[in-house]
Structures are given as structure tokens and as C-alpha cells.
Image (spheres, rainbow, N blue to C red):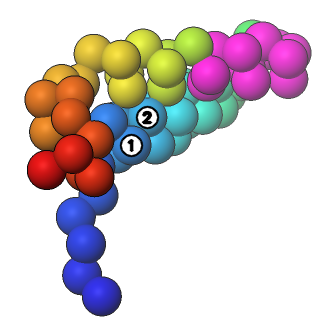
Amino acid sequence: MATRINPKVAAGGVAGAVVTIGVWAVGLAGVTVPAEVASAATVIVAFAAGYLVPAERGGKHVADE
């Protein structure tokens, strides 16, 4: 079964990974980031990325087509 990943979902996933790597890099620089702050940053950035990526179907539900 070959299905395309929805761009909004992909953006959220990539954003979460980028924030995780960013927190790790900041930790290497000696800055301590509390787990709660890292988690909140991941959620906020992933939400923003998903919000900013346009809908693939123009906002229509697949059942309406």
C-alpha cells in the first residue's frame, strides 16, 4: 500500500525532529533546557508548521469528493 504522506503531517513531524536536534545542540553548548520546556517547544513548533502548510485538498474532506 503506497500512500502519500499529507504535507501537513510531514511538516509537523519534521518540525518536531528539528526542535529535538536543536535542544540537543543547545545542551552540547552547556545550556540546560528543562524537559518541560523542550516538550512545549516541540509542540508549539510542530503546530505552527502544520498550520502554515496549506491543505492538500483545499480544506475539503475526502468523503466530500
State the extent of the magenta-drawn residues as a range: 32-43
| Amino acid under disc 1 | Val
Q: State yes or no: discs 1 and 2 in contact (Cβ < 8 Å).
A: yes
Residue appearing at x 25%, y 72% in the figure: 3
Res 1 quadrant in image? bottom left
- Alpha carbon separation for disc pair 1 and 2: 5 Å
Q: Is residue 31 above or below residue 15?
A: above
- In the image, 20 versus 52, the foreground residue is 52
Q: Position of residue 63 (x, y in %)?
A: 28, 52
Q: What residue is pinned by disc 2? A: 12
Residue appearing at x 72%, y 15% in the figure: 40
Q: What residue is pinned by disc 1? A: 9
Question: How many C-alpha atoms fall within 10 Å of the one at disc 2: few (<14), some, or many (≥20)?
Answer: many
Q: Position of residue 21 (x, y in %)?
A: 54, 35
The circle on residue 35 is none
Q: State the count of labels.
A: 2
Q: Can residue 18 be spotted in the picture? A: no
Residue appearing at x 34%, y 45% in the figure: 10
- In the image, 1 versus 60, the foreground residue is 60
